[in-house]
Image: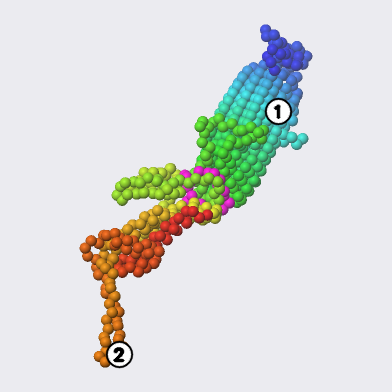
Amino acid sequence: MSTSEPPPWPHCAHGADPVGCRGIHVPGHTVCLAHLADDDRDAYLATLTPGASIDHRGTNFTESLLNAFLNAFRDPETGHPCLGHAKFGLATFEGAALFESAIFEDCALFESAIFEGDALFESATFKGDQALFDQATFKGGANFASATFKGQAGFSQATFEDSALFGEATFEVGSAGFGSATFQAATFESRAEFGLTTFEGIALFDSAIFEGDAGFLMAIFKDIARFNSATFQGDALFMDATFKGNAGFNSVTFQGDAWFESTTFIAADQLGPLVCAERVVLSGAAFGGPVTLSFAARRLECRRTRWSSTAEIRLRYATVDFAHAVFEYPLTIAAEPDPFVLTNGRQLAEDPFPIPRDPRVRVASLRGVDAAHLVLSDLDVSGCLFAGTVHLDQLRLEGACTFDTAPPAVWWRWPPVRFTERRVLAEEHHWRASQPGAVQGWNVAVLGAGRAGPLQLAPVYRALRKAFEDGKHEPGAADFYYGEMEMRRHADDIPPSERGLLTAYWALSGYGLRASRALAWLGAAMLLTIVLLMAVGIAHDTPKQTATGTVPAGGGKVTFEIDKGDPQNPTGNRFTGERFEKALNVTLNSVVFRSSGQDLTTAGTYIEMTSRLTEPVLLGLAILAVRNRVKR
């Protein structure tokens, strides 16, 4: 109501203001209670009895006047004020308003009232259908702790300039079956406490503004709880709260942390879309039904969170910690490429996030998770901790899920080190970075990442390889096969002979995955074979055949023996074009496991045998490596 407009009731009009005092007339008088003569005031107060209905809208109450007024309503048995239908709309309470343990038998109407001091309604009971504080202003502390509202409790557009305490309050459903707590568009400029509060009816906090911390610890919402378009400028604390009905957090903005630790959502089917500039903590929370979570947050913590039905988590910007989460049905974690769209068709504002924005979603940990029903879509898992994940081979990776890679540079030291680019787990980064003489480029473990060595990482690589193979992504599976073999080679539980065999397999062909390495060895082997054949393997000249026989003295049949001389070792200049051509012919035939038919020395024969054994193997490894990279 405008200050220049008179109220709709007969008012006192005392004072120089054009409208004057807005206090309603005391029955039988033409002034309000505040401007009533002392004798008349005492006489009026003497007529009041516990449970009487009163109307003192617009009246200014000093602390002494209010105390005297409430004393007239005190029940002799309980000593607590007991009022009937009470109208205090537009009233001003200049000092402390001491309504502690007061009982309002009927409606209590405080719309647009101003409490300049503390408003103490601790343990008060509102038995009427309505207890309305809409548009009221609480300049001091507002204490409704342990208060009971048996009907509708209205605080819409109320302003709490100091702390607002509703701890252990109860908002019941009245005898008519209707009850709600409405704090729509209310402003809490300081701390708001609703710990252990019970909302039996609908709880509406739409468009409310919490400028300080808001605490709903162990609160119970038995019906719909709605915080749509609310703003939490401090931390929002919903730890151990229970939402038995739908929980509406559409278009909510959390500028601090949003704590839902150990919170229970029995029937909520949607949470969000919402924006959180810091953390959304769902650790220990429990979801009883199918639910969709839509968060644009800096971090999401879901440690030991439990889902009892299907769930979809759609995220922007967030880093997700999913360690030891429990879900019995399919659960999808997906990155949302574009801002969330609200039911009204508008995009969710993302003001807390700076421009330019990076909406990528990163997974920090899946340790302790049973991944049999888990789907990851378009996520960055480069920093994810996989060790300890159960049924990792059944994990489904869809879209562009990116892993970390090995540092690709060549490090010139002794011995030189070069890592070919491949998908690498974060734990391997941490392990290699912790080794003596580790090269730069391997990421050091963050605090709390734990320690996992080759023995623990080999089965992780093996499971992820199977997951990629089941998804028909063979080239991706090849990287994890390489990682598995690397971890087996470095593990402490294998005998030296097996480690030597794996080392040879790695050095020759990168475990059958590095075609260039196998081809390099093949080229080196062929070159060595050619050089050795030219030096000692190719005979000096092709031996001539000789025929010898004896003619019988009396004539008759002549028998000849045909023989060929042994190849002679070369002498003189051995590295000629002719000898190179012969050596190349022998070598090329050896690669395809054929004999060239060339005359060789004894040493050359052994060289050819060795070549026919090793070079086809190297060629096969190169072909295998190419196939592993291109097959689908």
In this view, the residue in front, 131 or 383, is 383
Where does the image place residue 498, in percent across and percent down from the top left? 38, 62
Q: Which mark is residue 556?
A: 2
**Which quadrant holds the N terminus?**
top right
Where does the image place residue 416, in percent across and percent down from the top left? 32, 49
Instruction: Give the labeled residue for mark 1.
Output: 131
- Give whichever of discs 2 and 1 has the lower sequence position: 1
Outermost residue to the right: 28
In this view, the residue in front, 502 or 293, is 502
User: Which amino acid, by three-letter code, is at mark 2?
Assistant: Gly
Outermost residue to the top: 16
The quarter of the picture where residue 250 lies is: top right
Q: Residue at x 73, y 15 (%)?
A: 7
Q: Which residues are magenta?
A: 371-392
Q: Residues within 10 Å of mark 1 (few under 14, many from 20)?
A: many
Q: Residue at x 67, y 23 (%)?
A: 135
Can residue 450 be seen here? The reply is no
Q: Main secondary structure of the magenta part?
A: loop
Vertical position of residue 355 compared to residue 90: above or below: below
Is residue 330 found left or right of 610 in the rendered image?
right
Vertical position of residue 615 compared to residue 98: above or below: below
Outermost residue to the bottom: 554
| Circle 2: element type | loop
Query: Any magenta on residue 382?
Result: yes
Is residue 496 found left or right of 630 in the rendered image?
left
Q: Residues within 10 Å of mark 2 (few under 14, many from 20)?
A: few
Marks 2 & 1, CB-CB < 8 Å contact: no
Q: Residue at x 71, y 13 (%)?
A: 5
